[in-house]
Image (cartoon, coloured by chain):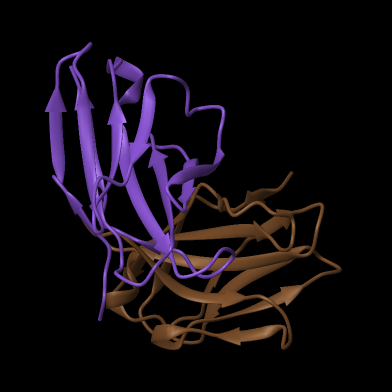
Chain colours: A brown, B purple
Amino acid sequence: AQSVTQLGSHVSVSEGALVLLRCNYSSSVPPYLFWYVQYPNQGLQLLLKYTTGATLVKGINGFEAEFKKSETSFHLTKPSAHMSDAAEYFCAVLPSGAGSYQLTFGKGTKLSVIP
Amino acid sequence: EPEVTQTPSHQVTQMGQEVILRCVPISNHLYFYWYRQILGQKVEFLVSFYNNEISEKSEIFDDQFSVERPDGSNFTLKIRSTKLEDSAMYFCASSELAGNIQYFGAGTRLSVL
């Protein structure tokens, strides 16, 4: 079984400041990890993913995340927040090679960007 | 860019009524999914569908729920007799292959009165 914990249901940052959204997971098999973003009244859009290989992955809109197996974490960062980054962010895990293709999501973190 | 489309965007129904939520997955995708998100809670997996049959379902997906691919483009979720607790945002997703990236639609907000 797998689970995802996102610390902080709501994070506020100033425009230009570092964005750090935390995600910890548990999985009985090596996981595939994803970050999705949801803008108001829109669907879930993939930001980035980790499957295998390089543990630092880059996504759209300047976001990146690092897979740290020892910490079971996949935190999302962006060096400089922009007003357009205000949205809700979801971390999700997919168990690789387990024959199950259901994504398990965290509860989401709503990011506010203060001008 | 290809996208998953869902209709309607908002559905209001009376308790006990049947509802059908519709989705058009991305055209070359083979795997289809339904998820739901009750207000304030996590996005939860309901069911996955491949080759015209259910490949996986969660405990939520009981006998009140069914899925169908009635033609080459649509993928539907039917709730036979809606309950108040079925009120949620329902997301459809599709992927090219199993284990690949799942692309989501904008969702249908179902309100059961």
Q: Can residue B89 be seen in this view?
A: yes
Q: Residue at position x 33%, y 81% from top?
A: A82
Residue situated furthest top in the rendering: B16
In the foreground, A99 or A66:
A99
Q: What is the quadrant of residue A14 in the picture? A: bottom left
Q: Tell me: B34 left or right of B112.
A: right
Camera-side residue of B101 and B52: B52
Q: Position of residue B99 (x, y in %)?
A: 59, 65
Across and down, in percent, residue A56 comes to: 67, 86
Q: In which quarter of the image is residue B19?
A: top left
> Which of the image's four quarters has the N terminus of chain A?
top right
For this rendering, which residue is in front, B98 or B72? B72
Tell me residue A91's x, y (percent). Answer: 55, 60
- Residue A105 is at least partly visible in this image: no
* Above or below, comparing residue A59 to residue B76 in the picture: below
Viewport quadrant of the C terminus of chain A: bottom left
Compared across the picture, whether B51 is left or right of A98 comes to left
Identify the residue at image location x=51%, y=80%: A18
Residue B93 left/right relative to B107: right
Between residues A69 and B93, which one lies in front from this camera angle? B93
Q: Which residue is drawn at 54% across and 70% down?
A: B100
In the picture, residue B24 is in which quadrant? Answer: bottom left
- Residue found at x 32% / y 70%: A114
Q: Is residue A52 above or below residue B84?
A: below
**Number of residue marks:** 0
Where does residue A47 sit, x and y in percent of width and height?
45, 75
